[in-house]
Every structure is written in structure tokens, then in C-alpha cells.
Image (cartoon, grey):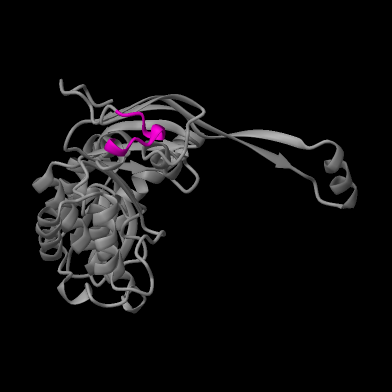
Amino acid sequence: MIKDSGTAPTVDIKDLRKLYMVTQQESGAGAAVQSLIHRRKLIVPAVDGISFHLDPGEIVGFLGPNGAGKTTTLKMLSGLLHPTAGEVKVLDYIPWKREKAFLRQITLVMGQRNQLVWDIPALSSYELNRVIYHIPLDHYRRTLAELTDLLELGPLLHKPVRNLSLGERMKCELAAALLHQPQVVFLDEPTIGLDVTMQRRIRSFLTEYNQRFGATILLTSHYMADVQALCKRVVVIHHGKLLFDGELAKLVQKFSEYKTIIVQIGDCQNNMADYGEVVSCEDGRITLRVPKAQTARVTEQLLADLPVIDLLVEDPPIEEIIDRVFAQEKA
């Protein structure tokens, strides 16, 4: 658990729960008739007693598989859903009261949802947002100029949204969500479906926005490159429960039992399995998986035994580590 920094948290969550009641019905005509008289109900916890906080200016990765409760949590933090139990404060407001002063300081960006009007230029939607948020005209123009520069929006602002590519639309969506300069930004898969170049641009923009405005950002993403580039700290949940809260480096250290050694030699050797588990071998480039405690010994042995051209020791991909976290929780 991340230690208290001594400052009042921007987001403070205590024992947060969201339960849904669903009905179950067996297949068949008899079961359908029976369900008219007596319905079998089941309580499903979407979020099951999680607690953590975010300090001012933090960028925190919020990780978990599909159905873990990430989006439900973000909706409760932004006031779209009322929790079943628990306490939440965002900027010292209770989100589901949806006070105007609260709404002016937060934003929720969902990669699969549109807020821009499809048939008009993005700039027209921005003007509408200016009126909704009561943004002074000079402030609006200054912020729009900054966002246009950071996101390279110049050629896009006057095009109907329907004519934009997915990456172009996502940049315009981000600008729309940030025109009022929110101090808390909830991001739900902001780079989903984007190509690698566009993902990199979005990550660069979020870093710059955080540095310029000191915004606190909670990010969910299935692209671990997003998390590694933006977040020193991660919160991991599964089946609505908190599994890990701490530095990303400590997550790697805690759940990674092996290292990856990539060695370049003249040609693949038949005896490479003597050094560790051979993951791949192609054109003299051999990837080995080695228990962490044996890494130093194996590295020394490789250098002594083989005509090594290059050698690299790495932690396993973060995706594998996250999968291991979920597997251990299931076990």
C-alpha cells in the first residue's frame, strides 16, 4: 500500500461496494413458466469493498481484466453511479450529489463513448461545452490554443466529426473533455483501437497535461505500454476486490519469479537448454527464461562458454506479470 504523502488526497475511497441484483432462468418452456411465478435472484458484486486514495498530481494505473469492476468504479467516482456502500470523496465532494462545483473540476473520458456531435465540426461542440461549463471567452480561447498545439488539432477542428479517423476523433474527444481544465481526469481505455503512433502521441499529451495543470489522473488501459509510460503506481483489482496497490516496479519485483536473458551469438546452439528455458531461437538470437535467483550465474556462464556478441537481461513483459497476479488470486 502506498504510504500517506501527508497531503489531503484528491480521491479518497473507503470500502467502496456496488452490488447488482440479477435474475437467473434455466432454459426450456417449463423454466420460463416457472420464472413468471418465482424468479431466482442473485446478488453480484461488481465492486467488493475496495479502498485506496490518489494524491494531488498523481497518475495512477487502474488495472484488471474485463469485468473486474474498473469502469463501474470510475462511474461511481465521477457521479454516474450511486454505490451500494462505502465512502468516496473526490476533491472533498461526494460524487453522486453531482454538485456543479464538483462537475466543473472533473472529467471522464471513455474510449468507446462519443461526446462530440457526429455531423458538425469539433469546434462547434467545443463552443457548446464552453457555454455548458460557463468558461470565460478569453480563458476558453487560451485553453483551446494550448490543447490545439499539444494535440496538433489545427487541421481537424473545422471537419465534421464523421469525417475524422478514429485517432483524430480521439484527440478531439480529449480536447473536448479538457477544455474546462479539470483537476481530476478519469480515463477509461483512452487509446483503445488506436495505432502505435497515435497511442504514443496520446501518452505524450497526457504527460504534458499533467505537468502543466497538476491534474490527478486515474487511467484504465489494456495496453500495458500506456501504464508503463505514464504510471509509477498501479492499483490492481479482480472480481471487484483489491489485489495490489503500490509502485509498478514493486509489482514486477513481487510477482516476477524469473528474468529474460536475450543473447546474440553467431548461431543457435543445441545445448542452450542447459542454461535455462529456451523461449525462442532465431538467427543466433536466443531468448532464455531463467529463475531470478540464477540470473547472475547463468549470465556469467553464457559469457564464459559462448562467443557472445550481445547480451541483455530484462524483466518479463508486464502483461505476463499481470496475468500471474490474476492467476494467483484465482488459485
In terms of depth relative to the viewer, which is nearer, 261 or 173?
173
Q: Is residue 142 magenta?
A: no
Q: Is residue 317 above or below residue 43?
A: below
Residue sitting nearer the eye, 15 or 79: 79
| In the depicted structure, whether residue 45 falls above or below residue 138 | above
170 displayed left or right of 241? left
The quadrant of the image that shows the N terminus is: top left
Question: Measured from the top left, where is residue 291 in percent x and y?
Answer: 30, 41
Q: Residue at x 31, y 29 (%)?
A: 93
Q: On the image, which quarter does residue 191 sit in?
A: bottom left
- Pick the residue in front: 136 or 235: 136
Magenta region includes residue 100:
yes
**Number of numbered tags placed on the structure image:** 0
On the question of residue 285 being in view, the answer is yes
The residue sitting at 83% across, 36% down in the picture is 38
Q: Quadrant of residue 127?
A: bottom left
Q: Position of residue 43 (x, y in %)?
A: 63, 32
**Above or below, comparing residue 89 to residue 58 in the picture:** above
The residue closer to the viewer here, 327 or 262, is 327
Q: Residue at x 47, y 48 (%)?
A: 66
Give percent across and percent down for residue 72. 45, 41
Residue 186 visible at all:
no
Query: Relative to 271, does residue 75 appear above or below in the rendering?
Result: above
Q: x%, y% of residue 59?
A: 21, 42
Which residues fall within the magenta stretch? 93-101
